[in-house]
Amino acid sequence: RDQKVRLNAYGSFDLQYSDIAKEIDNLINSDDCPVDSEGNKDLSQIAVIMTNYDELDNVAKELYARNIPYEQKEGQNIFEIKSLASGFISFPNIFISPSL
């Protein structure tokens, strides 16, 4: 959806991971939550992309603590994909997008 990009600064990584889980929790419980063709919430359309797997593990712990179902997948490093890497001026720390 048409939303502005936000940049958040955190005093610690733990606060960052907690805030990510909170944002996802808020999205799931809002009218903006992605839905499937039958109108059911489609959480598979929400993605968290981070620069390394350790960070994802920490976010997964926060999601688990909030009873938010998730599936953690390992894939190709997004910064090694030429079509994506050429579009970055600097390396972003986190992307949260309900449309991925």
Image (cartoon, helix red, strand yellow):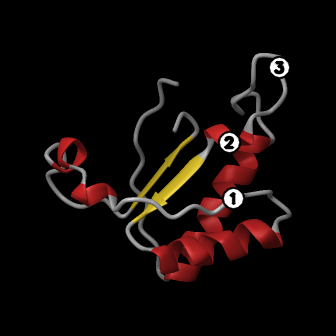
> Tag 1 or tag 2, which sits nearer the N-term?
2
The residue at the point 75 percent across, 24 percent down is 36
Q: Is residue 86 above or below residue 68?
A: above
Q: Could you tell me which secondary element the residue under label 1 belongs to?
A: loop
Q: What is the number of the mark on residue 61?
A: none
Amino acid bearing label 1: Glu
Few, some or many residues within 10 Å of mark 2 (<14, 14–19, 20+): some
Tell me how many marks there are.
3
> Tag 1 or tag 3, which sits nearer the N-term?
3
Mark 2–mark 3 distance (CA, rounded to whole Å): 14 Å
The residue at the point 36 percent across, 64 percent down is 93
Q: Which residue is labeled 3 in the image?
A: 39
Eye-nearest disc, 3 or 1: 1
Mark 2–mark 1 distance (CA, rounded to whole Å): 9 Å
The residue at the point 43 percent across, 60 percent down is 8
Q: Position of residue 64 (x, y in %)?
A: 79, 70
Q: Position of residue 92 (x, y in %)?
A: 30, 59
Q: Which residue is labeled 1 in the image?
A: 71
Few, some or many residues within 10 Å of mark 1 (<14, 14–19, 20+): few
Amino acid bearing label 2: Ser
Q: Position of residue 86 (x, y in %)?
A: 13, 46
